[in-house]
Amino acid sequence: MERICNFSAGPAALPQEVLEQARDELLNWHGCGMSVMEMSHRGKEFTGVIEQAEADLRELLAIPANYKVLFLQGGATLQFAQVPINLLGGRSADYLVTGAWSQKAYKEAQRFGAVRCASSTEDTGFNRLFAPGEINLDPGAAYLHVCTNETIHGVEVHDCATLQASVPLVADMSSHILSRPVDVAKYGLIYGGAQKNVGPAGLTLVIVREDLLGHVMQGMPTMLDYRVHAENGSMLNTPPTFAIYMAGLVFQWLKRQGGLAEMERVNIEKAKLLYDAIDASALYRNPVEPASRSRMNVPFTLARPELDGAFLAEAKVRGLAGLKGHKSVGGMRASLYNAVSLEGVKILVNFMREFEQKNG
């Protein structure tokens, strides 16, 4: 069977080159006679794997030397708790709520101290970013938290400078990290689950400025202390070795594509192609204000919801998968992560036009 066009929001498509390399190396990694899944995480072979992965990630994102890179587990959802546990330090923190994931992060953080909702767009259905003057920031906050791309609602922060934060900026970048260049120095901490643009589920990336380490709440488990993970090179316990190996292959693939500037160029082209098709249609509608639209996650609805089932069934026949919208909002969603090709988006757009002609 030929590979399909996978528009799943995550676990998501991986580059075919990466999958083929992993297949070829699966039983005998670099002549060592075993798989990466089987080797000791403290042996020289895997030490080389994780060190190379960190070096390539640092190169791709131009991560400054005073930031630690951590390869953790638990997904971004664990970070909703781990961030306040490590950074609150008895103070308050501000949260911007722009969709389902930032809302979950805000609610979880309330378990650990005084956190404030500095602004929310829930009243408009999370269909936009904040207008000037809508954000009420506390200059004495320990940090400001933002989800820079909302996977479910399809809202993306394209420039964090618009937030005008004077405190450390903490960003959940799970669903668009590595899709474009990022000025890491503008953030105190960046985190994200791997299963969008980085690799298979099971790995979580944390990039944290060194001065924010060492402030964990008293009585917390050692496994939740960023400083301890940093001191142990992400090997306090057995890390997700195969997921780190796969992420490393993705990092190398990104470098071969020309790096993040080239990925951004392609991602802009993919997103424009799909949004233009939706905006020109009488059947499809995207609910997000144009300036706030995500390049990675494109939700859309059909003007005739009774056609949803037929749309998904016919898409599947055409080899287009993962298009059903999140259960909380319904409709459709196409996720355009790095491994989704421009050609795949063209196939989707052509199918959407044909479906509308037949059912319009």
Image (spheres, rainbow, N blue to C red):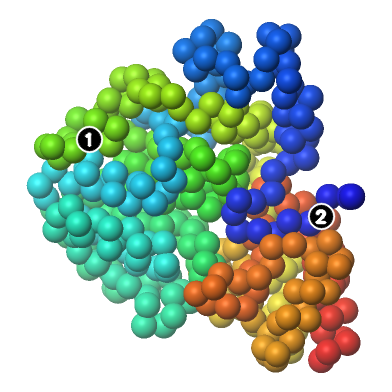
Q: Where 309 falls versus 64 (above or below)? A: below
Q: Where 110 falls versus 209 (above or below)? A: below
Q: Residue at x 75, y 74 (%)?
A: 312
- Dot 2 crowding, Cα within 10 Å, few <14, some 14–19, many 20+: some
**Quarter of the image that includes the C terminus:** bottom right
Q: Where in the figure is residue 3, as x and y percent of width and height? A: 83, 50
Could you say which quadrant of the image residue 89 lies in?
Answer: top left
- Dot 1 crowding, Cα within 10 Å, few <14, some 14–19, many 20+: few
Describe the element under mark 2 as helix, strand or loop: loop
Q: Amino acid at mark 2?
A: Ile
**Badge 1 or badge 2: first in the primary sequence:** 2
Where is mark 2, residue-wise?
4
Q: Where in the figure is residue 297, as x and y percent of width and height? A: 60, 63
Q: Amino acid at mark 1?
A: Pro
Q: Is 93 situated left or right of 349 in this image?
A: left
Q: Is residue 140 visible?
A: yes
Q: Is residue 132 visible?
A: no
Q: Where 12 falls versus 350 (above or below)? A: above
Q: Are marks 1 and 2 in contact (CB under 8 Å)?
A: no
Q: Is 152 situated left or right of 218 in this image?
A: right
Q: Where in the figure is residue 134, as x and y percent of width and height? A: 30, 74
Q: Where in the figure is residue 305, as x and y percent of width and height? A: 67, 88
Where is mark 1, residue-wise?
221
Could you say which quadrant of the image residue 130 lies in?
Answer: bottom left
* Gap between marks 1 and 2 measured at Cα: 43 Å
